[in-house]
Amino acid sequence: MTADRSDERERILRESSLAFFGAITASVSHELNNVISIIDQTAGLLGDLLAGARYGRPLTEEQLERLAEKVKNQTGRGVQFIKRLNTFAHSADEPVREFELNQLVENLTALSDRLAGLKGVTLRVQFTNQPLKLVNNPFLLQQTLFLIIKNLLTRSEKNDSITVSVSEQDNGGKVLIIAPAKESAEPDRPENLELLVESLEGSVKVGSEAENICYELLIPGIKYR
C-alpha cells in the first residue's frame, strides 16, 4: 500500500468514525432529553396537585404513588442510557482489545433502537448460548454493524423487523443481519463497508435468501475459554 493510499484510508476511517460517534451520541442525547422532559412534566403536575391541596383539593396516596413510579421509571431509563453510552465510549479506548461479542452486539443494537423506532421497525437480537470472546477492534466492529443496520433501515417499512444473530464460526465470531427484501431494493454494500471489514481483518457476504436480504460478517480473533 502506497503512502498516499494509506493516508487516504486513515482519513476516511477517521471521518467515518467521528460521524458514527456523533450519530450514537446524538441518539442517546435525544433519549435523555425525553427522560428529563417527562420528569419535568411530572414535577409540574406534582406542583399543581400540591397547590390544589393548599386550597382544600384532596391529594390522594394513589396520585403520589403514580407520580413517584413515573419518576422512578424515567430515572431508570436515564441511568440505562448513560450506562450504554459509557460502555460504547470506552470501546474506543484501545484499537485492539478483548471483548465479548454478545454484549457488544446487544449494546449496539440497543443504542440503535431509537433509529429503528422512528421508522416503526423492530430490532431483534439472537445470541450464542456461551460467551464469545474476541480480540479485535470493538469500536470499528460496532461501526460496521451500525452501517449495515442503518442501510437496512433506509429500505425498511413500518412493522418490518431486522434480526441480528451472533454465533461462532471459523475460529471467530459471525454476525448475521437479516431484513425483509423489497422488490425494488437489491442487496448492496454501503459506502466504506469494505474498508471497515478490511480493518477488522474479517469478511462480509451480501446476498438474498428466500425473501430476505442477508449480511454475513465474519470477525477473526476468537479467544477460547
Image: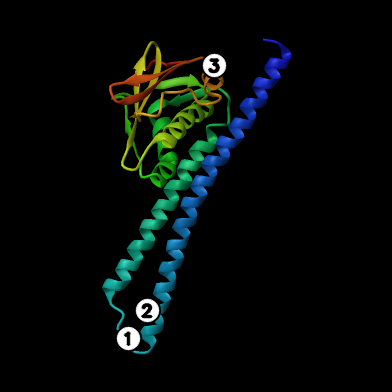
Q: Give the mark nearer the N terminus: 2 vs 3.
A: 2
Quarter occupied by the N terminus: top right
What's the residue at 39%, 15% (across, down)?
Answer: 224
The residues bearing labels 1 and 2 have C-alpha atoms spaced at a distance of 8 Å
Residue 49, numbered label: 2
In terms of secondary structure, where does tag 1 sit? loop
Residue 57, numbered label: 1
In terms of secondary structure, where does tag 2 sit? helix
The residues bearing labels 1 and 3 have C-alpha atoms spaced at a distance of 68 Å
Q: How many marks?
A: 3
Amino acid found under the numbered disc labelled 2 = Leu
Question: Farthest right residue?
Answer: 4
Q: Is residue 61 left or right of residue 196?
A: left
Q: Is residue 162 above or below residue 223?
A: below
Task: Please tell me whether mark 2 or mark 3 is closer to you in this view.
Answer: 3
User: Which color mode does the image show?
Assistant: rainbow
Residue 198, numbered label: 3
Q: Give the mark nearer the N terminus: 1 vs 2.
A: 2
Quarter occupied by the C terminus: top left
The residues bearing labels 2 and 3 have C-alpha atoms spaced at a distance of 60 Å
| Contact check, label 2 and label 3, Cβ < 8 Å | no
Callout 1 environment at 10 Å: few (<14), some (14 to 19), or many (20+)? few
What's the residue at 56%, 24% (across, down)?
Answer: 192
Q: Position of residue 112 (x, y in %)?
A: 44, 39
| Quadrant in which residue 181 is drawn | top left
What's the residue at 43%, 76% (across, down)?
Answer: 47
Amino acid found under the numbered disc labelled 1 = Arg
Q: Position of residue 16 (x, y in %)?
A: 59, 31
Q: Position of residue 83 (x, y in %)?
A: 46, 44
In terms of secondary structure, where does tag 3 sit? helix
